[in-house]
Image: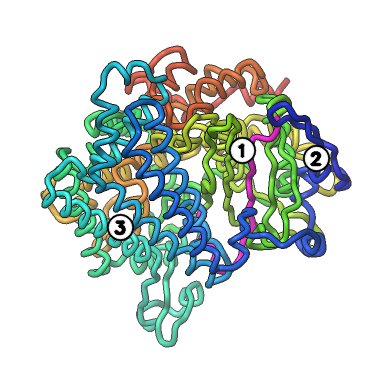
């Protein structure tokens, strides 16, 4: 169905030269090929290093790479301090950032994803070394003064292009949040707080995933086998939210979320340290500091957004909870009260019962190769971009099942590379995510430094009888993460400091969430969803049922996200906190969610997003509102409209963080939406889409 794996001759441009590549393969065939077949293919070619970096053929190469970056940074610091104020100042600062990021970004990925412990350890050392240099630069007064001279010269600043002005201001913001403008004593304190926050963040993240143990005699014998054993103890490492046994879910919830004193202390110290740092550098709260430069702008706007959304969801959420409670009573008459551990399970049961969306019915139509071919087709129609599989050199990838994609524009040529680390393996992080390995930027010689990213998923391997088959949820996750990747590929900023996804958090999720709308549109899915054995297309009615099923209990799902976002805002708001983090959790859960707090639980100690998304967890909801607006106004009529696709790239994807996010939204929608419009858009998304059923009856 997807081709025989023949070599394609692909033509692309670079500068004025026209080059021919004969090493690109059809993307669908590459992803449906079995890994064992590809091991033989990897035995040819010259030996290189990770991502084509020669030094990284061994773990020791990280030391060489970091030393080179540190020496280069010293030269650039001297250059930056001696240059006259002007655009060259911004360019040198960006070169400095690029020199360090090229090692730090790569090492950030390797330290969590490489299967070889020696590589992970070497990458961790490199991160620590580069991090120390960054701290040193953030307290370099002479470097700060050089940038300040530029920013204080109104005439020169007015002569700069908008992107250069914004990047200069962003570099100054980075200085100031580190306390560079303070006296020496306070500056030292700011550095100490930053170091402490990094250590506490790392400790807290580790603690969010650690299992809890309980004596196996405490639990009834008939549910013990649902958990792992550790001697005389049962080890609970998750919520078991999909278990059909109410007692298993209840036990997992109460054990896994049982308070841990060490983790509680860590969270309290983290929140306190963040607040101290924010106030030290001139912000009322950590939330005010975190939200500068975002679409929301400040915590007051965030809370207005969340409170208005919560109010408009209340009635629908109560209806959802009543439906779940009725289903629980139907399946288990002896225990009908709806509890927090019931929400994920019974909402799923309701979806499956109403719309017959058993994932196994869909999986045969969503082979990984077909989905990748579908993405390439969509990008080609919308943006003139195609995906091709390219054979990596030996040593270039960290696992034999990693695929390398060349992203090629029909006129502009090669745009960048995506490494696809899609398959499950031991010790691999479970979350789906996007890593920037190298940011795009315009080099001094006029060439463009091509972006390189990694997409990491956890998909099942192919078998002897079938390729990797995706559930609808996994297919949607793939589209989501590819939205991040294409944001990185299509960004064409002058500076790597603002390349691709290096933008405000509440804007960075817009391109990825928008891709979820494409993944739910029958016209898009119909291009690639074919049964891997028969070639039969996925029936339109099945897609309609799948789309409408997502709206079952969707108000309750969104209300849960509102609760998480409000909790995040309160924790990062005014300090000292009026109550303990657990008491705040209880009050917030009962006010903004609706299901009762369970005594002797502390869900906040498992809330890993508090580290990476501190004061910005609301971003998922606000980004979804923007993505929905863009979909409805621009793509819903025709998801393949090339003119609209080009405008989307020009107005939203091309700028990375080099333009204020709300201006990019305004450029795409021809207006600047209000908070009320954000809220109304999210609520309207919950309504049934009768058009899909009308199409089925035609």
Q: Is residue 42 visible?
A: yes
Q: Give the range drawn in magenta.
A: 413-431
Task: Give the structural element (helix, strand or loop) at label 1.
Answer: helix
Query: Does 341 appear above or below 27?
Result: below
> Residue 542, percent across and down?
68, 37
Q: Name the residue under label 3.
A: 198
Q: Is mark 2 on a helix, strand or loop?
A: strand
**Left or right of 663 in this view: 460:** right
Q: How is the image coloured?
A: rainbow
Q: Are marks 3 and 1 in contact (CB under 8 Å)?
A: no
The numbered mark, 3 or 2, whose residue comes first in the sequence reads: 2
Residue toward you, 643 or 304: 643
Q: Quadrant of the C terminus?
A: top right
Mark 1, Cα crowd under 10 Å, few <14 / some 14-19 / many 20+, is: many
> Going 61% across and 61% down the picture, which residue do you hit?
424
In this view, 42 is above or below 312: below
């Amino acid at each position: 169905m997807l081709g025989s794996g023949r070599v394609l001759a692909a033509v692309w441009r670079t500068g004025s030269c026209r080059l021919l590549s004969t090493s690109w393969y059809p993307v669908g065939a590459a992803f449906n090929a079995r890994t064992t077949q590809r091991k033989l293919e990897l035995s040819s070619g010259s030996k290189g290093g990770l991502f084509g970096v020669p030094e990284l053929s061994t773990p020791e190469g990280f030391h060489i790479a970091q030393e080179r970056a540190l020496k280069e940074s010293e030269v650039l610091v001297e250059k930056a301090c001696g240059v006259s104020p002007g655009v060259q100042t911004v360019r040198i600062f960006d070169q400095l950032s690029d020199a360090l990021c090229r090692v730090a970004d790569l090492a950030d990925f390797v330290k969590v994803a490489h299967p070889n412990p020696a590589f992970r350890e070497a990458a961790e050392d490199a991160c620590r070394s580069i991090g120390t240099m960054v701290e040193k630069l953030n307290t370099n007064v002479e470097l700060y003064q050089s940038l300040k001279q530029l920013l204080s010269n109104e005439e020169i600043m007015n002569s700069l292009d908008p992107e250069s002005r914004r990047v200069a201001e962003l570099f100054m913001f980075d200085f100031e949040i580190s306390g560079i403008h303070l006296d020496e004593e306070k500056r030292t304190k700011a550095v100490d707080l930053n170091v402490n926050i990094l250590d506490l963040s790392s400790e807290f993240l580790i603690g969010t995933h650690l299992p809890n143990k309980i004596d196996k005699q405490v639990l009834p014998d008939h549910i013990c086998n649902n958990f792992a054993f550790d001697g005389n103890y049962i080890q609970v490492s998750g919520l078991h939210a999909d278990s059909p046994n109410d007692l298993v879910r209840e036990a997992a919830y109460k054990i896994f979320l049982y308070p841990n004193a060490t983790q509680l202390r860590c969270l309290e110290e983290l929140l306190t340290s963040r607040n101290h740092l924010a106030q030290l550098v001139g912000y009322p709260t950590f939330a005010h500091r975190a939200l500068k430069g975002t679409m929301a702008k400040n915590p007051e706007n965030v809370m207005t957004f969340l409170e208005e959304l919560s109010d408009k969801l209340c009635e629908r959420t109560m209806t959802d909870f009543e439906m779940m409670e009725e289903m629980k009573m139907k399946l288990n008459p002896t225990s009908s009260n709806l509890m927090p551990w019931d929400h994920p399970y019974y909402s799923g049961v309701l979806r499956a019962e109403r719309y017959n969306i058993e994932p196994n019915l869909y999986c045969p139509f969503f082979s990984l190769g077909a989905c990748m071919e579908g993405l390439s087709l969509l990008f080609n129609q919308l943006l003139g971009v195609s995906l091709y599989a390219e054979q990596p050199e030996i040593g270039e990838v960290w696992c034999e099942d990693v695929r390398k994609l060349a992203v090629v524009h029909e006129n502009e040529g090669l745009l960048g590379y995506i490494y696809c680390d899609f398959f499950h393996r031991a010790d691999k992080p479970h979350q789906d995510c996007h890593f920037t390995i190298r940011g795009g930027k315009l080099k001094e010689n006029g060439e463009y430094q091509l972006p390189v990213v990694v997409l990491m998923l956890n998909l099942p391997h192919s078998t002897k009888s079938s390729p990797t088959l995706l559930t609808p949820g996994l297919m949607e996750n793939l589209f989501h993460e590819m939205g991040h990747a294409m944001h990185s590929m299509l960004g064409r900023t002058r500076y790597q400091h603002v390349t691709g996804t290096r933008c405000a958090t509440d804007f960075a999720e817009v391109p990825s969430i928008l891709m979820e709308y494409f993944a739910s549109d029958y016209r898009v899915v119909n291009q690639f969803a074919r049964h891997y054995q028969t070639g039969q297309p996925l029936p339109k009615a099945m897609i309609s049922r799948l789309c409408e099923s997502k709206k079952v209990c969707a108000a309750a799902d969104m209300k849960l996200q509102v609760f998480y976002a409000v909790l995040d805002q309160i924790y990062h708001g005014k300090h000292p906190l009026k109550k303990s983090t657990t008491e705040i959790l209880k009050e917030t859960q009962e006010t903004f969610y609706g299901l009762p707090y369970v005594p002797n639980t502390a869900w906040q100690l498992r809330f890993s997003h508090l580290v990476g998304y501190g004061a910005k967890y609301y971003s998922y909801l606000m980004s979804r509102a923007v993505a929905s607006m863009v979909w409805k106004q621009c793509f819903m009529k025709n998801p393949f409209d090339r003119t609209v696709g080009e405008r989307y790239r020009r107005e939203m994807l091309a700028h990375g963080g080099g333009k204020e996010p709300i201006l990019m939204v305004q450029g795409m929608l021809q207006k600047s939406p209000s908070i009320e419009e954000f809220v109304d858009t999210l609520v309207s998304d919950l309504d049934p889409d009768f058009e899909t059923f009308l199409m089925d009856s035609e």
